[in-house]
Image (cartoon, rainbow, N blue to C red):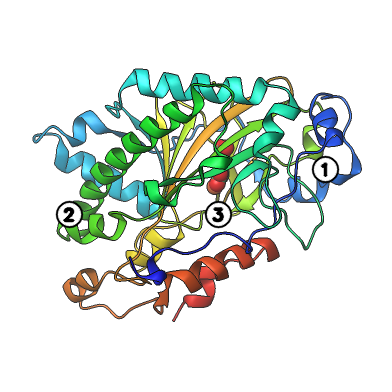
Amino acid sequence: MEAAEAPNYDSIVNRDEITDAAAAAFANPEQVPEKYVRTEEVLDGVVVGADESYELPVVDMARLLDPELAPSEVAKLGDACRNWGFFQLTNHGVDEAVVQRMKDATVQFFSSPLDSKAKVAVRGNGFEGFGHHYSRASSGKLDWAESMILITQPVKDRNMEMWPTNPPTFRDALDVYSVEMIGLAMRLLGFMAADLGVEPEALQDAFTGKRQSMAVHHYPPCRQREKVMGITPHTDGLGLTLLLHVDDTPGLQIRRGGRWFPVRPLPGAFVVNVADILDVLTNGAYASVEHRVLPDAERARTTVVVFQEASVGGLVAPLPGLLDQQGARARYRSIEIEEYIKGNFNALEQGTRFIQSLRI
Ligand SMILES: O=C(O)CCC(=O)C(=O)O
Ligand SMILES: [Fe+2]
């Protein structure tokens, strides 16, 4: 593979270790150390309340796979990707045992003592390992969460010394899960292609053999919810994101028209979202939308998130087939994937959005 197709995620992200002090803070939901206090950010934007009825898009994989029901379900999928950038996916067809093993291993990993988790702690400017999520240099504040990030595919890109051995089931659970998620992503991309009016391969090829990384997040409860952020508002920088709720604790919020819409997790569903590269591939037809996490006051929340990278011939660019078919002009300029990854992480740290700078 050419160098341009295997971007290096290290040295471009800044992640803080989970120190003894951080672990102690997370274990005490009553008190919030100054390093985590960011009330102004939390209160930026109205949260749509439980009293207002709204329906986040739900897409049913069983209907997508049914030839009779597919056309209307593909339209629903397309509508979700264009107008929300997010949907919940029901009847996803992923082996329940695989999902359960991943959930169990994740819960066991986070409930083990800090010195055990710290065996795979982030190192230097490393992207992978156990630590805080990305730190925003500009604010100096930290997210109220502990996260572990790993590169999972292709297998040759794995950094096995960063893969936990405790619990002993973790590595195998993740290995099997990561393969299932590629399959799920490819099926979804086929239906997205149908919505976009291009051949399935036109979109799927952009993801085939590309990198997959994953994050497991644990958001401890916090009684002073208005003070802390579980994850800073951001858009996802890669292609497609597949999120699994390990429990039924809510916390994820999606920005729409200046307001935050809480996701009400449906039992057994995945939350799928369009990330920045898919926004570019579709020439802006699909929207990569800002989201954040607020921790719950009472209950911990744990998620497993898979990120699929994409590029076309080493470039992040609108799909040529899509532009031809629409006779449209490109809304984004093309950029090499390596350069894109660097720019994206840099922008994330500064609190800006890299794909804005690619707009023509
Ligand atoms: O845990 C969540 O609900 C969201 C995580 C997320 O946005 C991310 O990892 O990019
Ligand atoms: Fe995200």
What residue does disc 1 label? 36
Residue 257, disc = 3
Give the structural element (helix, strand or loop) at label 3.
Answer: loop
Return the disc, 2 or 1, that comes first in the chain's sequence: 1
The kind of residue on which mark 2 rests is Pro
Instruction: Say which of 193 and 174 sits in front.
Output: 174
Q: Is residue 299 above or below residue 325?
A: above
Disc 1 to disc 3, how far (Cα)? 27 Å
Task: Give the alpha-carbon distance from disc 3 to disc 2, as whole Å.
Answer: 32 Å
Indicate the secondary structure of the residue bearing disc 2.
helix
Give whichever of 146, 48 is nearer the camera.
146
Q: Is residue 317 above or below residue 121?
A: below
Quick one: label 1, few (<14), some, or many (20+) residues within 10 Å? some
Viewer-nearest of discs 3 and 2: 2
Kindly indicate the quadrant of the structure image that contains residue 89: top left
Q: Is residue 254 visible?
A: no
Instruction: Locate residue 285, reporting x and y percent.
Output: 34, 62
| Element under disc 1 | helix
Q: Disc 2 designates what residue?
A: 200
Of the image marks 1 and 3, the number of the one nearer the N terminus = 1
Q: Which percent across, then down, holds residue 70?
A: 15, 38
| Callout 1 amino acid | Tyr
The circle on residue 342 is none
Q: Three-letter amino acid code at disc 3?
A: Gly
Q: Nearer the viewer, residue 314 or 343?
A: 314
Q: Which of the two discs, 3 and 2, labels the residue nearer the N terminus? A: 2
Q: Residues within 10 Å of mark 2 (few under 14, many from 20)?
A: some
Q: Quadrant of the C terminus?
A: bottom left
Picture residue at 80% right of the left edge, 31% below the top:
23
Per the model, the C-alpha gap separating discs 2 and 1 is: 45 Å
